[in-house]
């Protein structure tokens, strides 16, 4: 392999970490190398402002969909993540909805958050200067000369030939970065299916399937035909019915019968990523036992519910979700 790319490999696969900044940094530099058209000069310059925008993009998408933990200290998220979480919560407030939107589709101007967005970028640049830009080049007390920095001005300098090599090997580099990023997240997060989540975010392929197919199972709990809301216990009109993930979908990233209940539409959209109560969890466990008795025992769905009951998934995932 090319010796310059070999250095990138070493840094990506062997770097130390207590948060995921280094991977966001590496990914941003590769993405800028792929998209740059400045091929006239011998030296190519990337501005920290551009890098910061990509940081915000990566972390916005991972946070708004799955709220992934990006550092080893759960109580104190890395600075840049705090800025982005603040921006996301302002966005939800303006929208008066908890519906996630990808960063690429965001228009901070029209929702009146362009100033807040600019501040987020500025703060991110500050952290890049202090913390991230030089650390990435260091491995085992050695500094790898893969780029030069002007930390005051916030600029990265690369030889044109090196940028062209990064471009040429970008598929491999992106794969390595995502692999390593996933590995870090698996160390920081309890939630299941991390690699599937990371891939789904990257491929822009976060689909939420219709939950209608679960109705005929959930209906088994209401033999008189009166469906009741799991949370308030009241009867549900046809028009009010919603199927809810008791442990949030953003945590599970899957639709499992053992985690699904009927509830009022309004309650569902208010709930979002909130933690279910211990009492809800106890009732869900009881519901699952009863539901299992009412189901025919020759289907895959029966087998899955049986495993969930036997292994007590409800309690286990709830405890890990609580952290
Ligand atoms: Zn209700």
Image (cartoon, helix red, strand yellow):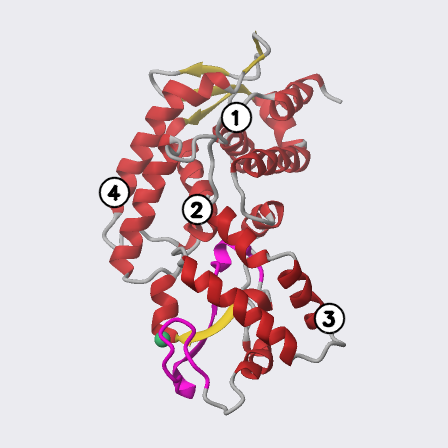
Q: Nearer the viewer, residue 205 or 47?
A: 205
Residue at 41% across / 77% down in the picture?
A: 229
- Whether ligand 1 has any atom under 8 Å from the Cβ at mark 1 is answered as no
Q: CA distance from mark 4 to mark 2?
A: 17 Å
Q: Which residue is mark 1?
A: 40
Of badges 4 and 1, nearer the viewer stands 4
Disc 3 is placed on an element classified as helix
Q: Which residue is mark 3?
A: 300
Ligand 1: image quarter: bottom left
Q: Quadrant of the N terminus?
A: top right
Q: Is residue 200 above or below residue 33?
A: below
How far across and down, in percent of the image, does residue 217 sit?
Answer: 60, 79
Compared to 245, does 190 lie above or below? above
Is residue 134 shown left or right of residue 264? right
Q: Residue furthest bottom?
A: 224
11 vs 310: above or below? above
Highlighted range, magenta: 227-254
**Label 4: which residue?**
116
Between disc 4 and disc 1, whose residue precedes? 1
Residue 233 falls inside the magenta stretch:
yes
Mark 4, mark 2: which one is toward the viewer? 2
Q: Residues within 10 Å of mark 4 (few under 14, many from 20)?
A: some
Is 26 in front, or is 305? Answer: 305
Asked whether mark 2 lies closer than 8 Å to ligand 1, one says no
Mark 2 lies on residue? 63
Q: Is residue 235 covered in magenta?
A: yes
Tell me the SS state at disc 2: helix
Q: Position of residue 213 (x, y in %)?
A: 60, 77
Q: Earlier in the sequence, mark 4 or mark 2?
A: 2
The disc, 3 or 1, on the residue closer to the chain's N-terminal end is 1
Return the x and y of residue 284 as percentages of the image width and height.
50, 66
Check disc 3: other Cα within 10 Å, few if <14, some if 14-19, many if 20+.
few
């Amino acid at each position: 392999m090319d010796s310059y790319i070999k250095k990138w490999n070493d840094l990506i696969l062997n770097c130390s970490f207590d948060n995921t900044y280094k991977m966001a940094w590496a990914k941003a530099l590769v993405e800028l190398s792929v998209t740059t058209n400045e091929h006239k000069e011998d030296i190519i310059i990337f501005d920290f402002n551009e890098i910061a925008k990509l940081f915000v993009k990566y972390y916005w998408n991972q946070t708004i969909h799955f709220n992934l933990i990006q550092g080893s200290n759960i109580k104190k998220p890395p600075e840049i993540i705090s800025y982005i979480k603040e921006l996301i919560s302002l966005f939800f407030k303006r929208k008066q909805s908890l519906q996630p939107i990808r960063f690429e589709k965001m228009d901070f101007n029209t929702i009146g958050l362009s100033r807040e967005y600019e501040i987020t970028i500025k703060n991110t640049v500050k952290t890049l200067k202090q913390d991230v830009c030089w650390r990435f080049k260091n491995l085992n007390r050695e500094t790898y000369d893969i780029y030069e920095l002007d930390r005051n001005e916030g600029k990265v300098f690369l030889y044109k030939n090196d940028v062209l090599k990064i471009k040429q090997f970008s598929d491999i580099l992106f794969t390595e970065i995502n692999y390593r990023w996933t590995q870090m997240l698996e160390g920081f997060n309890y939630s299941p299916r991390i690699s599937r989540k990371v891939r789904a975010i990257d491929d822009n392929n976060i689909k939420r399937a219709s939950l209608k197919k679960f109705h005929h199972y959930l209906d088994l709990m209401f033999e008189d035909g009166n469906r009741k809301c799991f949370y308030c216990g009241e009867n549900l009109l046809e028009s009010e019915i919603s199927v809810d993930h008791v442990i949030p979908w953003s945590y599970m990233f899957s639709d499992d019968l053992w985690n699904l209940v009927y509830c009022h539409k309004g309650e569902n959209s208010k709930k979002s990523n909130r933690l279910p109560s211990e009492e809800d969890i106890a009732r869900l466990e009881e519901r699952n036992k009863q539901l299992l008795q009412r189901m025919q025992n020759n289907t895959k769905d029966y087998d899955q519910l049986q495993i969930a009951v036997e292994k007590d998934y409800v309690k286990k995932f709830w405890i890990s979700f609580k952290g």
